């Protein structure tokens, strides 16, 4: 299977017309049709049904094209990143986190790092799930994690970054938004959004509130769904401070509880590059200097 065949297949799936797809790919129709047939012969099933009116995807073909489209996009990104890298850099440090705001000072750290290491690229990667698993497969150089996730993990060096407390998230016009601190009794009678991949520490707080019998709850699939429900006035939620994007769309009020999150960066023990140590040092200093920054 060639990249040309992949592109031809995706284009035909869009147009469902051999002549138009061939024109869009700047080849003759016989050449185009031949490449599609070669691809189908290689994979062993028909991607398209032919007729006098054009082409239609078979059920197996529809699934296959969906996979090809994602693969082609990943390949395009890999080529673009490779082009960027080869043009300027001789080394790269990848850092993976669940969401962009988890490492709030990352952009500033990247600017500062480039001043001292202009030939080393910092490559952010965002994976809401499985980031630790991918890191342990050596897919990334650094991963943002909670310290509770790093217990009994071999071959990993853990770097303490900051402590993050729990906040209550409400709409800006919610009566609770004007408080400086939220206590358990403040949310009695309210609907609390729970679930959505919450860390164990947060789940413990949620269960304690629900167990009181004085707080209603609503299961939410993920953090973005939860925020959408909060914006729609369907409820309120608790969240770690490191998820705050500081956009001002929601009110984030500190919640009065003893639980907090120890946020760390993990690296591979065998990775002792000086550039990596420099980058970690910059990030640590930015957080240690941000004593008044809400986390």
Image (cartoon, rainbow, N blue to C red):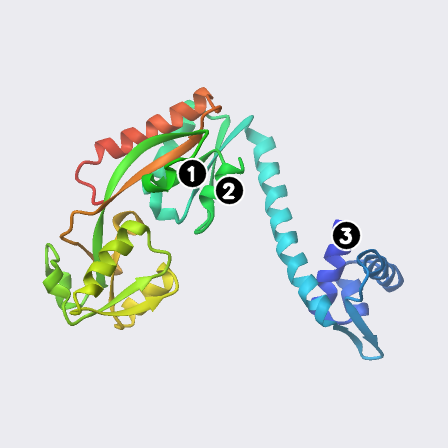
* Tag in front: 1 or 3: 1
Q: Secondary structure at mark 1?
A: strand
Q: Are marks 2 and 1 in contact (CB under 8 Å)?
A: yes
Which residue is depicted at the point 82% across and 60% down? 44
The answer to whether marks 2 and 3 mark residues whose Cβ atoms lie closer than 8 Å is no
- Any mark on residue 134, and which? 2
Q: Position of residue 84 (x, y in %)?
A: 57, 37
Give the quadrant of the C terminus. Answer: top left
With respect to residue 290, does 185 lie above or below? below
- Occupied quadrant, residue 269: top left
> In 3D space, how far apart are the residues under numbered discs 2 and 3 (Cα atoms)?
30 Å
Residue 224: image location, x then y, percent: 37, 61
Residue 261 locus on image (x, y percent) = 26, 44
Q: Nearer the viewer, residue 134 or 151?
A: 151
Instruction: Rate crowding at label 1 as few (under 14), some (14 to 19) or many (20 or more) other CA atoms within 10 Å.
Output: many
Q: Say if 225 sits above or below 99 in the image.
A: below
Provide the secondary structure element on which disc 2 rests.
helix
CB atoms of marks 1 and 3 within 8 Å: no
Q: Left or right: 45 with respect to 270?
A: right
| Residue 247 visible within the image | no
Please state which of residues 182 and 195 is positioned toward the viewer in this rendering.
Answer: 195
Numbered badge on residue 143: 1
Residue 148, picture quadrant: top left
Q: Earlier in the sequence, mark 2 or mark 1?
A: 2
Which one is nearer the viewer's eye here, 61 or 34? 61
Q: Residue at x 43, y 51 (%)?
A: 128
Task: First in sequence, mark 2 or 3: give its number.
Answer: 3
Q: Earlier in the sequence, mark 1 or mark 3?
A: 3
Gap in Å between the C-alphas at discs 2 and 1? 9 Å
């Amino acid at each position: 299977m060639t990249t040309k065949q992949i592109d031809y297949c995706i284009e035909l799936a869009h147009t469902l017309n051999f002549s138009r797809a061939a024109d869009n790919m700047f080849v003759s129709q016989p050449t185009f049709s031949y490449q599609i047939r070669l691809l189908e012969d290689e994979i062993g099933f028909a991607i398209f049904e032919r007729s006098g009116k054009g082409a239609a995807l078979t059920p197996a073909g529809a699934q296959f094209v969906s996979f090809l489209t994602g693969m082609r996009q990943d390949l395009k990104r890999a080529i673009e990143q490779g082009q960027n890298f080869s043009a300027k850099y001789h080394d790269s440090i990848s850092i993976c986190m669940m969401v962009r705001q988890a490492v709030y000072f990352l952009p500033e750290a990247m600017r500062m790092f480039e001043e001292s290491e202009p030939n080393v690229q910092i490559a952010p990667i965002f994976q809401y799930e499985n980031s630790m698993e991918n890191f342990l497969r050596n897919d990334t150089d650094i991963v943002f994690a909670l310290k509770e996730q790093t217990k009994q993990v071999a071959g990993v060096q853990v770097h303490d970054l900051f402590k993050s407390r729990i906040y209550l998230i409400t709409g800006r016009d919610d009566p609770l938004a004007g408080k400086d601190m939220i206590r358990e009794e403040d949310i009695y009678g309210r609907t609390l959004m729970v679930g959505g991949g919450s860390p164990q520490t947060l789940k413990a707080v949620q269960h304690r509130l629900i167990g009181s019998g004085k707080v209603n709850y609503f299961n939410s699939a993920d953090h973005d769904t939860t925020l959408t429900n909060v914006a729609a006035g369907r409820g309120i939620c608790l969240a770690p401070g490191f998820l705050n994007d500081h956009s001002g769309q929601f009110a984030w009020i500190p919640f009065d509880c003893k639980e907090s999150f120890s946020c760390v960066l993990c690296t591979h023990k065998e990775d002792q590059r000086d550039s990596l140590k420099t980058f970690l040092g910059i990030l640590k200093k930015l957080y240690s200097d941000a004593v008044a920054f809400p986390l």
